[in-house]
Image (tube, rainbow, N blue to C red):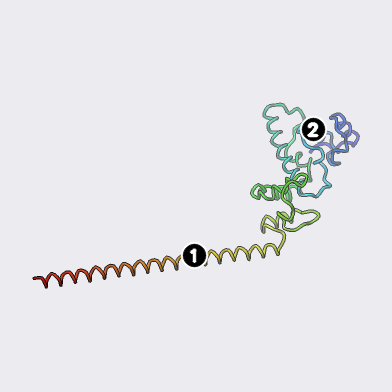
Amino acid sequence: MLPAVSLSAASSAASGSGLSTQTFGKEVLKSPLLVQFVTALGIDPALTHRTDPSLRIWYKKYNSYNEAVAKLTEMKAADTWTLANVGRTELINLFSGRSFWHSHVSGAFGDIQNHKTMVQWLEVEDDEGPSDLEVWHLQKPHYTFKDLGIWKKEGTLNKDYKKKLQQKEKAKARQKERKEKNRNTDDSMDEAETSKKGRKVSSGKSKKSVSKSSGSKAQK
């Protein structure tokens, strides 16, 4: 556990780093060490606030946390980490409460790379990317971790859209089945026609053979 200190001490640490205390979340400002960790690891101080419920902000926090872990590991290996020892728990505390992080954040984004469309939506900057309707198939003021869980399971938040999608898939399946059936019917007809022609040719040859045999006997 990191020692709790006065807000004035944390403010001094932030000032010493050249950053305004207003850029840090109040939880981080409780400890000058946390402020130093944020600065040393190159974390955006704005991500230390806990007041924005946006999934996009939480996704940024998740990525920033993973980048911080990687950078800390690299600095420790190179023996360039000069601050107090810090573990993953302290790094999580820079962005969120530990229980919420483990119950919501890590589970929601741990497999998010398997959902490329959602990743594109989460990374949208200045409306350059897929819209809410294109991804969620409806529009809401904000989306929750529960919404994300439903979307990963169902592929949509819009039940009507899902029904239409299922109907469309069934129609495609029926159309494919009909084409396959027609193809098989055509193949059977071609085989029957080929067999019929073969019998005609064979019959014709037999008649010619009989005719020749009769003519030969007559000449004798």
Q: Give the crowd class for mark 1: few <14, some 14-19, many >=20 residues within 10 Å.
A: few
Q: Could you classify mark 2 by the number of other residues whose Cα lies within 10 Å: few (under 14), some (14-19), or many (20 or more)?
A: some
Question: Pointers 2 and 1 in contact (CB under 8 A)?
Answer: no
Q: Residue at x 45, y 68 (%)?
A: 185
User: Camera-side residue: 215 or 152?
Assistant: 215
Q: Which residue is mark 1?
A: 180
Relative horizontal placement of residue 32, taking residue 165 as reference (left or right): right
Describe residue 23's horizontal placement relative to residue 77 as left or right. right
> Measured along the vertical axis of the image, is residue 107 above or below residue 18?
below
Q: Which mark is residue 93?
A: none
Residue in the image at 45% along x and 66% along y: 184
Splitting the image into 4 quarters, where does residue 137 fall? Answer: bottom right
Q: Amino acid at mark 2?
A: Thr
**Nearer to me, 175 or 39:** 175
Q: Is residue 58 above or below residue 80?
A: below
Quadrant including the C terminus: bottom left
Q: Quadrant of the N terminus?
A: top right
Q: Percent position (x, y) of residue 143? A: 77, 54
Q: Residue furthest right?
A: 8
Q: Is residue 198 above or below residue 140?
A: below
Disc 1 element? helix
- Image point (71%, 37%), residue name: 67
- Of tags 2 and 1, the one toward the viewer is 1
Q: Amino acid at mark 1?
A: Glu
Task: Say whether disc 2 or disc 1 marks the residue closer to the N-terminus.
Answer: 2
Q: Mark 2 — residue?
A: 39
- Rendering coords of residue 31 (x, y %): 84, 36
- Give the total of numbered labels: 2
Picture coordinates of residue 32 (x, y %)? 84, 34
Q: Residue at x 80, y 50 (%)?
A: 53
